[in-house]
Image (tube, helix red, strand yellow):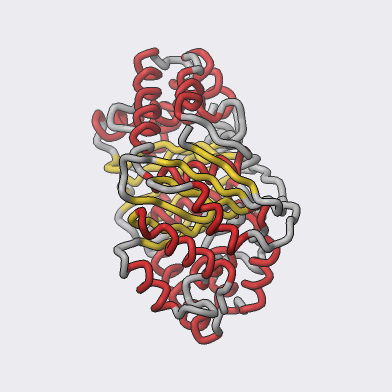
Amino acid sequence: MSIRLTTLPNGFRIITDFISTVETASVGVWIGAGSRYETPENNGVAHFLEHMAFKGTTSRSAYEISKAIEDVGGYLNAYTSREITAYYARVLKEDVGLAIDILGDILQNSTFDMEELTKERDVILQEIHQSKDIPDDVVFDHFQEIAYPTQALGRTILGPEKNIKSMTRETLIEFMKNHYNPSQMVFSAAGNVSHDEIVARVQLYFSQEKKALPFVPEPASYKGGTLQETRELEQVHLILGVKGVSSQHKDFYTSSIYSTLLGGGMSSRLFQEVREKRGLAYSIYSFSSSYKDSGVFGVYAGTSKKEAPQVLEVIKEELRKSTKTLSQEEVNRAKSQLKAGLLMGMESTSHRAKTLAQQLLTFGKVFTSEEIVQEIDAPSLERIQEFAKTILDCPFSLAAVGPVKVLEKAVDFQEKIF
């Protein structure tokens, strides 16, 4: 088997996936600490910390970090989500050691220089302003907020401007100290790599920290409701959703199949009914987002002010119909799309490294492609329809941005979609 796992005495995990047919490797550190691990007072710190990790260490300046990786044609980046922060690189196989050294350096020896912090604060504020100019980003933040009001899962990843403006060096260091502990970290590598060589090198940076219990964030509690923001835009951007399932729920793949057949491609129900048959919207799709202990299921659409009420009604009607009229052909097509996406992703070293790390952080183990294919194949048509009935019998969440006054009458429907 090409996948090997080593757990250091302090709980830090190192996993590799050897692929002999490539000349490159993707490596990175995934940490089980995203924005849902924050408080209202430090909301935005996980993302701020991710930025600052690249701004200088005790041995490298910010320029030297980027130059070192780009001198060998490599790529270095990071991201923050609601449950995970990741730092990763892609390099030629002979430069894996360098990539590990850089990742270890920025995660163990960052200085959080005050001058760099001041500059990066301005960069993040610009990122927040840019995000606010993108209405389909804003509507997803609103949807998350109304689904999980006054909770960490409902707050934005970037954080509010007032937090960023007051963020201190001590706040960053404290968050890193509390959440970047070995049991919440995974080093993952995929490509033409040697497991033993990677373990030996990674140990130099991550074996000294003491073992600590992982931090458990506050439990998520889906609520639902409406949140609409009036803006002078050409389109109304809206999301109608309900409570979904967690990443560890038995119906996780059932939800993925249902989302795919409902609005996951050009042959999906929503795309055909809303765009192809009626011409009501350019963009429409469904999604299933899962967290460790909760999840949301929703439909996004971007449409004109004139068509917005009708689009919302059509979405509601298609959701209702889907509990009774699914066909085996639709189910088979959705399953094929999911399986193809899974197997195509396996051709990317970056995707493989990310998937291994996320599985370890979420489930404590990894799954083979064959096991996942079996999970996708398992749900019957009847089970998928029953699942649809279950999640739709739930208080809705409606978020909208744009000339939303046109939706005033459209949202006067019952608390549930049925």
Provide residue 293's location: percent of width, then percent of height: 65, 40
**Can the viewer see residue 69?**
yes
Relative depth, front residue between 136 and 357: 357
Provide residue 13's location: percent of width, then percent of height: 61, 49
67 to the left or right of 149? left
Figure quadrant of the C terminus: top right
Residue reaching furthest bottom? Answer: 115
Relative depth, front residue between 253 and 140: 253
298 to the left or right of 94? right
For the point 28% across and 31% down, the residue is 266
**Can the viewer see residue 412?**
no
Relative depth, front residue between 412 and 113: 113
For the point 30% across and 55% down, the residue is 234
51 to the left or right of 311? right
Question: Up-down: is 289 above or below 265?
Answer: below
Provide residue 331's location: percent of width, then percent of height: 40, 19
For the point 64% across and 42% down, the residue is 222
